[in-house]
Image: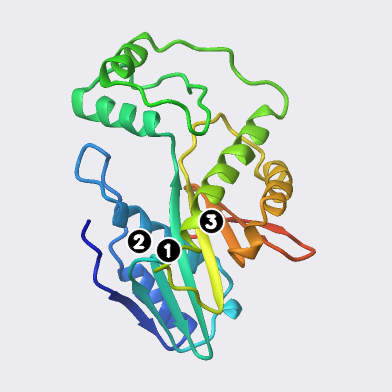
């Protein structure tokens, strides 16, 4: 496994300069069948995180470095923050997306499948049959989408915790985790879903490893901290 060399992504002396540098970043995430790699999602997520957080949360001047263990170092005047990244996506769904794109399988609009964290890996042939069948499944009722979302996000946070405390992982005065939410679900109420995720994070002692946990998809970002106000929901900001 090749360990990436540290790369300075941007430097900024003011909030305006930070916005300008973020807008210059290449944050395109190619399709899974067209050369998408881990670093594409990492850059997309960090750019949106820095564009979404209020400017008063940063100390200037600052430098953002893309590295490994953790994935990013946000070095600010008087404070350093290590930022780790993970993507919440079922392996079978990611593989199915690859097959849809590469082989043109199935309908353009299809039913959202039911999945569980850690489910067994399926073969390509099994996934092809499921894609072509496009069965509707049992659907969702009540607040089950919000509860499933919370359970899935907690699963990926829990997976990262031992890695973020293992030998060779650099710890900083502050340590954050970004979870890129690509979990397949119907439309959910993120405010309600966050109230289900908060106690799960507390029970697993996630805040003893990460000072802040950010979960975002392409439209919303939720922020979780071990403070009385434990979650904040913000519309995702484009780096511009």
Marks 2 and 3: which is nearer the front? 3
Left or right for 76, reference 224:
left
How many residues crowd around disc 2 within 10 Å: few (fewer than 14), some, or many (20 or more)? many
Do callouts 2 and 3 mark residues in contact (Cβ within 8 Å)? Answer: no
Which residue does the numbered mark 2 point to in the structure image?
43
Q: CA distance from mark 2 to mark 1?
A: 5 Å
Which residue does the numbered mark 1 point to in the structure image?
46
Q: Dot 2 lies on which element? A: helix
| Residue under the image location 68 percent in, 58 percent down | 232
Percent of width and height locating residue 34: 20, 41
**Residue that sits furthest to the right in the current view:** 228
Which residue does the numbered mark 3 point to in the structure image?
161
Q: CA distance from mark 1 to mark 3?
A: 19 Å
Do callouts 2 and 1 mark residues in contact (Cβ within 8 Å)? Answer: yes
Is residue 179 shown above or below 81? above
How many residues crowd around disc 1 within 10 Å: few (fewer than 14), some, or many (20 or more)? many
Left or right for 5, reference 199:
left
**The C terminus sits in image quarter:** bottom left
Residue 12 visible in this rendered orientation of the protein: yes
Nearer the N terminus, badge 1 or badge 3?
1
Left or right for 63, reference 24:
right
**The N terminus sits in image quarter:** bottom left
| Residue under the image location 62 percent in, 35 percent down | 188
Nearer the N terminus, badge 2 or badge 3?
2
Residue 238 visible in this rendered orientation of the protein: no
Q: CA distance from mark 2 to mark 3?
A: 21 Å
Marks 1 and 3: which is nearer the front? 3
216 or 80, nearer to the observer: 80
């Amino acid at each position: 496994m090749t360990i990436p060399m540290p790369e300075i992504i941007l430097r900024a002396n003011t909030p305006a300069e930070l916005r300008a540098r973020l807008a210059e970043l290449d944050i395109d995430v190619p399709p899974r069948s067209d050369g998408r790699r881990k670093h594409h999602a990492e850059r997309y997520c960090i750019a949106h995180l820095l564009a979404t957080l209020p400017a008063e949360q940063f100390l200037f001047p600052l430098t953002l470095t893309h590295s490994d263990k953790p994935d990013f170092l946000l070095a600010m005047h008087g404070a350093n923050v290590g930022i780790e990244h993970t993507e919440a996506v079922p392996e079978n769904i990611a593989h199915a997306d690859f097959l849809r794109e590469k082989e043109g399988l199935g309908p353009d609009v299809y039913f959202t499948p039911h999945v569980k964290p850690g489910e067994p890996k399926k073969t390509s042939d099994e996934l092809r049959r499921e894609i072509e069948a496009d069965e509707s499944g049992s659907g969702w009722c009540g607040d089950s989408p919000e509860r499933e979302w919370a359970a899935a996000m907690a699963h990926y946070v829990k997976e990262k915790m031992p890695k973020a405390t293992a030998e060779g992982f650099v710890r900083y005065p502050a340590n954050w985790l970004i979870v890129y939410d690509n979990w397949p679900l119907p439309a959910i109420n993120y405010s309600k879903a966050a109230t289900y995720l908060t106690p799960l994070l507390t029970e697993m002692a996630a805040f003893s490893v990460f000072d802040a946990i950010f979960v975002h998809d392409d439209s919303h970002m939720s922020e979780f901290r071990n403070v009385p106000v434990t979650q904040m929901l913000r519309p995702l900001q484009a780096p511009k």
